[in-house]
Image (cartoon, rainbow, N blue to C red):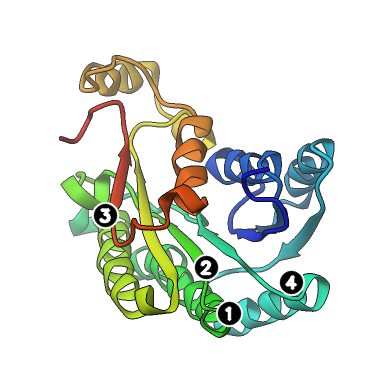
Amino acid sequence: MLLDGKVALVTGASRGIGRAVAVALAKAGAKVAVNFAGNETAAKETESLIKEQGRECLLVKGDVSDSAIVEAMFAKITAEWGTLDILVNNAGITRDGLLARMKDEDFAKVLDTNLNGVFYCSRAAAKIMMKKRSGRIVNMSSVVGLTGNAGQTNYAAAKAGVIGFSKSAAKELASRGITVNMVAPGFIGTDMTAVLSDKVKDAMTETIPMKRVGTPEDVAAAVLFLVSDEASYITGQVINVDGGMVM
C-alpha cells in the first residue's frame, strides 16, 4: 500500500473534503486520526468508512483555533500510535459578509480557525517530524486566497495567509525531510456550497472551463499524491483543484 504503516491526522474530517481525504489516506494504507469540532455523529460516519478499509481510526475532538486543545490532540495521537507522518490541515469555517458590514468577531473567528489553526497544528506536527527527519504537511487553501472574492474578505485573507505561511514553513523544514504543500480547491460540491441557490451555482459553473463542479474526491486525490513518496521532491507549492477556474 502507498501509505502502509503511516500515521495521519486530518483536521475537519467529519464531512466534505476532510472526510474524502481521510478515507483516501485509509484506502492507501494509513492509520487516520479524524479531528472534528462538534459533530460527533458525522465524525463516527467517517470513522466507519475508514474501518471499512480495514484501517485503524482515532477520533480526536477539538477546536483547532485553541492552541492548548491542539497540543492535547497531538499528545493523544502520539500516545496511541507513537508518531505522526502526515498532517492535513483542512478544518475551516466561513462567516461571509460585505466588508463595510463585517463584524469584528466574524473576521477574527475565520482567521482563528482557518489560519491560526494551521499554525498551531503545523507547529505541533513539526516538533514530531523534525525528530524523525521526515513528514508531509498539506494545508488547505482556496482559489479565493489567490483571486479574492466579494463578501469573503475574512476567508480570502485567511486562505492567502495559509499560502504565505506554508511557503515559509516549507523553506524552514525542507532540510529535515519535511514537505509542506497546499491544495487550493475551486468550486467543490460540499455542505458549504450546497446552501447556494441554483442560480448562483449555475453562474459559478459557467466560469469553470471544465463546466462541472468538483468533488471532494477530486481534492483528496491531489492530497494523496502530495503526501506520498512520489511527491518527495515537491514542497512549497500550491496545487489548484478547480477545473481550470484559475490559470
Estimate the x, y position of residue 26 in percent, counting from the top left.
Answer: 70, 44
Residue under the image location 27 percent in, 43 percent down: 143
**Disc 1 on helix, strand or loop?**
helix
Task: Tell me the CA gap for discs 3 and 4.
Answer: 31 Å
Mark 1 = which residue? 132
Look at mark 2 in the image and give the residue it sits on: 135
Depth check, mark 3 against mark 2: the one in front is: 2
Q: Secondary structure at mark 4?
A: helix
Discs 1/3, front: 1
> Which class describes the residues within 10 Å of circle 1: few (<14), some (14-19), or many (20+)?
some
Q: Position of residue 110 (x, y in %)?
A: 40, 62
Residue type at tag 1: Lys
Q: Secondary structure at mark 3?
A: helix
Whichever of labels 3 and 2 marks the residue nearer the N terminus, that label is 2
The answer to which image quadrant residue 38 occupies is bottom right
Other residues around mark 3 within 10 Å, as few (<14) / some (14–19) / many (≥20):
many
Comparing marks 2 and 4, which lies closer to the viewer?
2
